Amino acid sequence: MKNKNEHKNKDHKIPLSVVILTFNEEKNIEACLKSVHGWAERIFIVDSFSTDNTLEIVARYTKDVYQNTWKNYESQLNWGLQNLPINTQWVMRLDSDETVTQELRDELSERLDKLDNDTTGLYVPRKVYFLGKWIKYGGYYPIWLLRIWRNGMAHCEKRWMDEHMKVSEGNLIFLKNDIIDDNKKNLHWWTGKHNDYATREAIDILNLSYKFLEYDSVDAELSGSQEKRKRWIKENFYVKMPLFVRPFFYFIYRYIFKLGFLDGKEGLIWHILQGFWYRFLVDVKIYEIKKKSNSEGIGILDSIRELYGIDLQKKGKEN
């Protein structure tokens, strides 16, 4: 009898659609799809014209594949939520380098159908792995992310970096079990990605002062959720510190006071690259944009366009 019940639970699909964005993710996508295949009712892929074997791998797991030209993460995800034929009660956002643990699968199978109608969003803890090592310290676990919501009740906030889901109404609850972030691409790719992230974050920080873009953001609240609290600290404390000084303080806070040194050799690399180098690069780009603006007598938006080829005036109209 026990074996029959286990087989039944394994084959049981819950009313959940998983939305995954892809572009050249052949190293990561199969593990991601395996973790949701067979129990999530539908899997939707929004691909931005991959040129590797991503779509061949995807075809083994789902036929729900859609193509859309990439602008940024927010616009791609919101395009998917607005255009995909999602007909399930619940929706989950999952990155292509993430996997759902068996424990989270079991928790969702057990709890999702029992939630009251006032519950509209579910926070999930995320474990980040780097060079095969779980980054447990430095304030990096748990990272709480709103990744599951009732169909039609949430959208991705309009920002250039660090985009979160925003639920329109209802109650939010916290699940116990994890999703895993374990990107299999190499360090060359990682640094390139974070170079791009640094440009996007520099734009977000500059926008706090110059207000050249209208954002539909999650509120920054010191007494709110983890994401709201972190954003409040960033906007009311971190960005007001001097350029080039704040990355040193942030790294010391993470590596010493938040015990990042306990993550070992891989943790040392991670906290230096992600907690210092990346933040320092953001400041360098802010400095470069402001210096060009002042020396050439042009606006911040013109400086960003000339330096990085990003026309924010055009994108502002599109949003």
Image (spheres, rainbow, N blue to C red):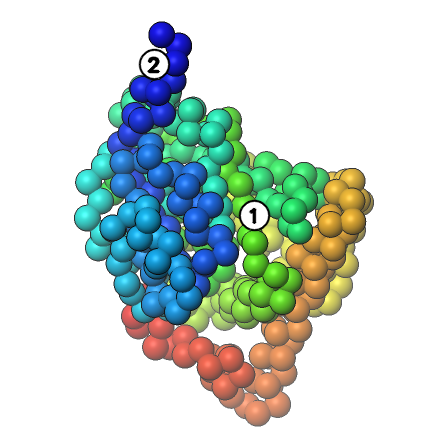
The residue at 27%/36% (across/down) is 41
Of the residues under marks 2 and 1, which one precedes in the sequence? Answer: 2
The residue at 35%/20% (across/down) is 7
Q: Is there CB contact under 8 Å for labels 2 and 1?
A: no
* Left or right of residue 7, residue 195 in this image: right
Query: Which residue in the protein does label 2 denote?
Result: 4
Q: Amino acid at mark 1?
A: Asp
Q: Position of residue 146 (x, y in %)?
A: 43, 40
Badge 1: residue crowd in 10 Å (few <14, some 14–19, many ≥20): many
Foreground of the two, 61 or 132:
61
Query: Which residue in the protein does label 1 denote?
Result: 182
Q: Nearer the viewer, mark 2 or mark 1?
A: 2
Q: Is residue 120 above or below residue 3?
A: below
Q: Position of residue 203 (x, y in %)?
A: 51, 69
* Left or right of residue 197, residue 42 in this image: left
The residue at 40%/33% (across/down) is 122
Judged from the image, the secondary structure of the residue bearing numbered disc 2 is: helix
Foreground of the two, 287 or 120:
120
* Left or right of residue 65, residue 290 in this image: right
Q: Is residue 265 above or below residue 197?
A: above
Farthest residue toward the top? Answer: 1
Q: Position of residue 258 (x, y in %)?
A: 74, 41
Q: Could you tell me if residue 29 is visible in this image?
A: yes
Q: Amino acid at mark 2?
A: Lys
